[in-house]
Structure formats: C-alpha cells, structure tokens
Amino acid sequence: MSSPAVHLPVPRIPGRRGRLQDVPVQGKKKVLLAAPRGYCAGVDRAVIAVEKALERYGAPVYVRKQIVHNIHVVTELEKKGAIFVEEVDEVPSGSHVVFSAHGVSPAVVSAASDRGLQAIDATCPLVTKVHREAVRFARDDFEILLIGHEGHEEVEGTAGEAPEHVTVVNSPAHADTIEVRDPSKVVWLSQTTLSVDETMETVRRLRERFPQLQDPPSDDICYATQNRQVAIKKVAVGADLVIVVGSANSSNSVRLVEVALEHGAKAAYRVDYVDEVKQEWLEGVETVGVTSGASVPEVLVTEVLEELAGAGYRDVEEVRTAEEDLIFSLPKELRQDASGKRDSRALGGRGHA
C-alpha cells in the first residue's frame, strides 16, 4: 500500500553560480552575518531523528507533516527514504511514523495508536513544555488565550491539548475583540516561533482588557527564535539590504524579515535558495545583512555568501549577540542502536552558528 506524500514546491534545479554582477557602489561593499542563525536544537533533534529512524528501521519511514518547515531539509530526507504525509490515516498499519518538531494533539497520538503505528515523537521539547502548560491550566479551569497563527501545526497541537479551554489570538488587533467567560481566570500562552515584540504588544492589549491575565510560568517563545531576532535587529541598523534564508511556511523565518524592516533595514527579502537572490536588490547597496531561520542548514547560507562574494561583497563581518550550546536528547526509541547499546548520536547535535 502506498501513501500520498505532502504536496511540496518543486525542488530547485541548482542555478549557475556567478549570476550576480559586481556593480560599483559609492562606499565599500560588505556583509554583516548574523549569529546565532540557522538550526536550533529542536530542529537538529528532529532531523537527526528521521535520519536515525531510517538507519535503524530502513526505508520507508513516514513523517506526519514536514518534519521542520524547510523545503531543502524535506527534499533531502525524501531522497533517503522518508515519506511525508498529511495525516496518520495515510500511513500503512504497523509502519513507523515520526511526529514533526511542531508537535501533535492527543487526537493524533490516539489515531496513530488505533492504526497500530510505531510512533516516534520528535516534538521540540520547548513545544512540549507549552503543551504541558496548556494541560495544567485547563485542569485548573483557566481560559487559555493562545497567541499564535491559526492553522499553524504548532498551534493546532497545543490547542488540541485542551480545546474547550483554548482561544487562539492571531494578532494585537485580534486581542481587542477577544471575549472570555471569567476575566479573573485567564492565562496567555504562545506559539514558540513568534515575533517577540508583536507577542508582547498582544499581551499588553489583552492585559488592558483583562487586568488579571496571568503569565505562563516561563517564556514560551523559544530561545532560538529570540536570539535570531536580537541578532537581526543589530544587523538591520547598518544594512541597506537583509537576506533571510528560510522557507515561506517557516514562521520564524518570515518574522526575521519583518523584524529587519522594523529595525532599520532599507529592504529585506526571504529566499529558500541563493538562486532567488535578484541582481536589482543589490543596486546601490553597500552593506548586506544575512541570516537564516531556525530550520535552515548552514550550507544554504554558505551558498548565498559565495554568490555575494562574486558580486563584490567579500568582506564578511559576523555580528554575534549570543552563544548557543543547548542539545536535546533524541526520542527514547532512537537512543540505542540495534544491539541495545547507547548510540553515539543519542544527544544529536551538529553545531550551531
């Protein structure tokens, strides 16, 4: 029995290098390279989980939704034998299925169990933390205002932990229209990949209407999302152009473009691949800022830097605002090899920029 794959954009055909021309500008050309950027610990863990499942169990291994929101990562895993599906009912009974880094609701876990699937949960531990908060506050009969994007997989998973108690708040403007049952028992939680500034503005507006609004026990927006936004803010101040490497369905990548524009960049664009960088973007540009979303492998950034170097942007200055050394353990099913010994990659980790 075959299973339909998730519909994805057509993978790029690598373009000719040296497309961009070295056109003179008034000042000195340079690149400000944001750090941290690229893979976070949760993404690294999820990608390695699929790779190890393929090594351990053989192809195919099924993955519900995209394991992370990056077309390059998904395409490379497909080449190794991963099959991406929309829902678990598309997976043949008894097969191995990996839940993506964005998390799933209890209903999805139950549906997988009903089909006899051997599930491997690659949910980012920071997303799991938000799930547990939702369960705890629902148990105490709080109304949960979940700040996030309706329809995003992470939001669906978190809301699914306590659907009768959760209301999704899409934006600061949406906060002005929210109604609650009991203003004295309201708490906010958030999607982990949002703009920090926009989330705080949403919370401010909610608290104006509901003064007893409670905060989550710890910050829900993940460290990597925050760190990448802080770094691009510093870069944007001195950049004529910012290029963000990341996919269109990657919330944190899209936010980086917005943050760059809000903090001084004259222009900012998101690209999946270097081939999408346009010559006209560089017209009159002295300083180019470069960063990447938390689900982007460094090789894609390197390709952009190489192409920019050919256009005269050879001076690269790294702008580092934080160090990251967090590593998450792999899902328990993958921490041992086939012989039962602890696997050398049990902690995952390929290093982060």
Image (spheres, helix red, strand yellow):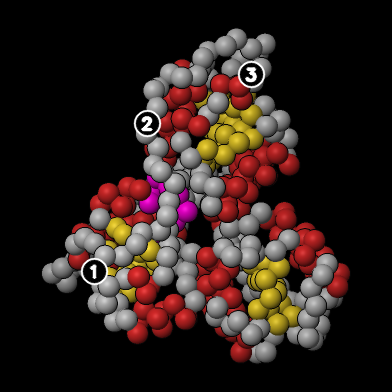
**On screen, residue 37 above or below 115:** above
**Front position in the image: 227 or 137:** 137
Residue depicted at 52% across the width and 25% down the height: 316
Q: Do the residues bearing badges 3 and 2 touch, measured as CB atoms within 8 Å? A: no
Q: Dot 3 lies on which element? A: loop
Quadrant in the picture for residue 162? bottom right
Residue 69 colored magenta? yes
Where is residue 149? Give x, y as percent.
Answer: 63, 62
Residue extent of the magenta highlight: 67-74
Quadrant in the picture for residue 349? bottom left
2 vs 1, front mark: 1
Q: Which residue is mark 1?
A: 1
In the rendered image, the residue lying farthest to the bottom is 140
Residue 351 colored magenta? no
Q: Which residue is mark 2?
A: 14
1 vs 3, front mark: 1
**Residue at mark 2 to residue at mark 1: CA–CA distance:** 33 Å
> Which numbered marker is on residue 283?
3
Q: Dot 1 lies on which element? A: loop
**On screen, residue 22 above or below 55:** above
In this rendering, would 343 be left or right of 137?
Answer: left
**Residue at mark 3 to residue at mark 2: CA–CA distance:** 24 Å
Marks 2 and 1, the one that precedes in the sequence: 1
3 vs 2, front mark: 2
In this rendering, would 300 be left or right of 311?
Answer: left
Q: Dot 2 lies on which element? A: loop
